[in-house]
Amino acid sequence: MKNVTVYTTNTCPYCVMLKNFLTDQGIPFTEVNVQQNPVEARKLVETTGQMGVPQTNIDGKWVLGFDPQTIMAIWNS
């Protein structure tokens, strides 16, 4: 089982779409709300160089934005 973490904010419609997609696919994930957690927000920017959300980490591989095809490709690899 791969480890999936989704980085989100309260106001991001693509974050909601991504979480719904993962749920529909039966993929368990951990959500980190960077709007409520400035320490994680800073770590995310330091790690990926990106401030935007959603960002998804699947066993160390990063997917930026709402990108179901890439997520499924990594999940099924």
Image (cartoon, grey):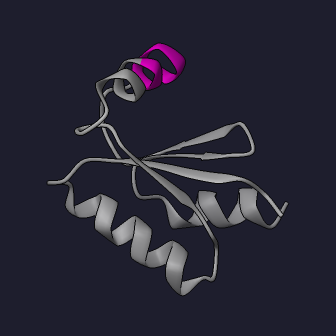
Residue 12 in picture, x, y percent from top left: 20, 55
* Highlighted range, magenta: 43-48
What x and y, as percent, mark residue 66?
Answer: 41, 58
Residue 37 is drawn in which quadrant?
A: top left
Q: In the image, is residue 47 part of the stretch drawn in magenta? A: yes
Q: Total of numbered circles in the picture? A: 0
Name above or below for residue 63 compared with residue 2.
above
Residue at 37 percent of width and 22 percent of height: 39
Q: Residue at x 47, y 76 (%)?
A: 21
Above or below, 51 relative to 49:
below
- Position in image of residue 62 (x %, y %): 60, 39
In which quadrant is the C terminus drawn? Answer: bottom right
Q: Name which residue lies at 56% across and 50% down.
A: 5
Is the stretch drawn in magenta largely helix, strand or loop? helix
Where residue 68 sits: x, y (%)? 52, 66
Residue furthest left as drawn: 11
**Residue at x 45%, y 26% (from the top left corner):** 44
Vertical position of residue 42 compared to residue 7: above or below:
above
